[in-house]
Amino acid sequence: MAKNMQPVLKRCRTLGVSPAAMGYSKTSNKNPGGQRRAKKSEYATQLTEKQKVKFVYGIQEKQFRNYFEKASRMPGNTGEELMSLVERRLDNVVYRLGFANSRRQARQLVNHGHFTVNGQRVDIPSYLVKSGDVVAVCEKSVSNAFFKKLKEDDAFVAAPKWLDRDKNALQGKVLAMPALGDIDFEIAVHLIVELYSK
């Protein structure tokens, strides 16, 4: 799999994404994009929105296009369905529940088999959770130093309203499908739909 080795904060600045959305800073940067050229072409604006989503969720082009094609076949708004699909990825759910400090770390923890979905061990970061699914830390992994510290740490993690976190049991439940308003960064999803619809 291709890997983007560009420094995260530099890429955040280029795409205008707050580092807080990447889990690198808990304070919001008021002007993450710095000074930019006055005018961007329509295509450049659409491309930037697509690159932003791919970068935040750590998705490659082929997989992202597959998500778009799947979303376009679903009933309802294509853009909202697309964002719902990427938000339901297991690595993202682990991050949003507060079991990892960033989506990259969440992907690694999932890859190493530290999580179960409904009692079954899952090591695929792109696994899509459904409403009613219970995501938990494996019994073997609970004794791991990272998860021990996580359980002892009293830091409050505000899970989105479509997820319910049980901190004491190191598990969370998917209450509903995520909506566009549940995304933790600004995104003009209609531009992505326009770009792929050309």
Image: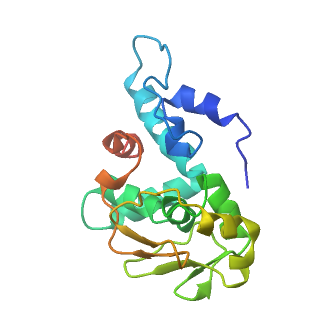
Picture mark count:
0
Pick whichever, 171 or 70, lies toward us. 171
Please indicate whether residue 15 sits to the left or right of residue 198 in the image: right
Extreme residue in the bottom direction: 119
| Quarter of the figure with residue 109 | bottom right
Q: Residue 182 appears at what percent x and percent y?
A: 34, 55
| Quarter of the figure with residue 99 | bottom right
Q: What residue do we see at 29% from left, 52% from top?
A: 181
Q: Residue 114 appears at what percent x and percent y?
A: 68, 74
Q: Residue 153 appears at what percent x and percent y?
A: 59, 61
Vertical order, 59 against 115 (above or below) = above
Vertical order, 57 against 28 (above or below) = below
Extreme residue in the left direction: 76
Q: Residue 55 appears at what percent x and percent y?
A: 57, 43
Vertical order, 3 against 158 (above or below) = above
**Quarter of the figure that contains the N terminus:** bottom right
Extreme residue in the top direction: 38
**Quarter of the figure that contains the C terminus:** top left
Colour approach in the figure = rainbow
Please indicate whether residue 1 sits to the left or right of residue 94 in the image: right
Please indicate whether residue 151 sits to the left or right of residue 39 in the image: right
Q: What residue do we see at 55% from left, 72% from top?
A: 127
Vertical order, 176 against 92 (above or below) = below
Please indicate whether residue 91 sits to the left or right of residue 185 in the image: right
Q: What residue do we see at 63% from left, 28% from top?
A: 10
| Quarter of the figure with residue 141 | bottom right
Pick whichever, 94 or 2, lies toward us. 94
